[in-house]
Amino acid sequence: MVIGRRALPLFWRAYNECQLKDRRSALERDFIRYLFRDVLSAIDRKRFILTADRAFADVELFDLLDFLGISFIIRSKDNVKVMIDRKWEKLKRLRLRGNQRRRRWGRLWYCETDPRRVYLVQSRARNREGKWEMWHLISNRPLSASTASSEYARRFSCEEGFRDRKRMLGFADARINDIQAWQRMFTLVAIALLVLTVVGCQLIKESQLSNQLLRCVRSRRRARSELSMVRAIAELMKKQTSLWELLSLNHKLNLEATL
């Protein structure tokens, strides 16, 4: 669940490294099949848009998502070929017009070795180093270039949330061999993020108090904060132990109700 620039994990599965060899794509498809058929079965599938990075741009995954009725926006590697003007061209050879930031190519054939009809959008964006890079976005829906780019950009909230789990909550320091213990540890990390979010939502209701407290941990810029809510609350709870009173031993961590 995305909250601002961070995302909270709602469902996951863990695998031993030996299970992934030559089976990763199949396991990913099994995960998605179980996720939408069982875990999220009560929600209308028209409400979903699945986004994923280049490692997941697999035509068999496209087929599965089409079969399940799930919209997707997946970034493709630039060496994959698409058919343009009856010729197969690598994505990296396609160019934007003039000073365009985004371009919608429409529906075309994707992947010369195993073709599928998909919609292609190109979008320029800056990476963490500030350099321009090209997004080649594949979808099964005729989305505008702006919509497709905006939806894909939301995916980075998951990356930033995972960075918080590894660095801020110490998950990267864990040395766990047993897969069940790893899953329990990840559950504790997810609960910790949920606790921070609940406290943050409680503070937002008291805007004057929250602004006063947040000045202790963030820069004095008024337009925006340098910290996410999760990071800001984590830093605050180290300094303001009274914030723990916002949680009770019997508090239900119902994120939907809190938001």
Image (spheres, rainbow, N blue to C red):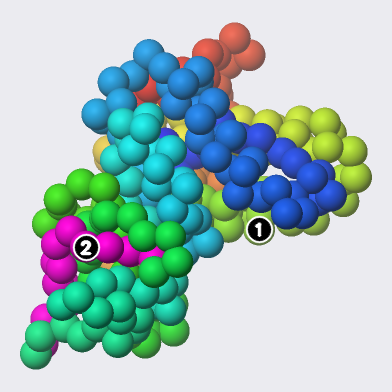
Question: Which residue is most to the top?
Answer: 250
Q: Is residue 247 placed above or below 132 in the rendered structure? A: above
At horizontal 29% and vertical 40% (from top left) the residue drawn is 71
Q: On residue 167, which mark appears?
A: 1
Q: Earlier in the sequence, mark 1 or mark 2?
A: 2
Tell me if I can see residue 236 in this picture.
no
In this rendering, position of residue 56 left or right of residue 25: left
Question: Which residue is most to the right?
Answer: 177
- Res 12 quadrant in image: top right
Hey, what amino acid is under mark 2?
A: Leu
At horizontal 37% and vertical 32% (from top left) the residue drawn is 67
Is residue 110 in the magenta section? yes
The residue to which callout 2 is attached is 108
Q: Is residue 51 placed above or below 54 in the rendered structure? A: above
Q: Is residue 119 placed above or below 12 in the rendered structure? A: below
Hey, what amino acid is under mark 1?
A: Arg
Residue 92 position in % (x across, y down): 34, 83
- Front in this rendered view, residue 86 or 157: 86
Label 2 sits on a secondary structure element that is: strand
- Front in this rendered view, residue 123 or 126: 123
Q: Is residue 57 placed above or below 187 in the rendered structure? A: below
Tell me if I can see residue 23 in this picture.
yes
Residue 14 position in % (x across, y down): 72, 39
Is residue 37 in the magenta section? no
Magenta span dominant secondary structure: strand
Provide the residue span drawn in magenta.
99-111
Identify the image quadrant of the C terminus: top left
- Res 183 quadrant in image: top right
Residue 106 position in % (x across, y down): 14, 62
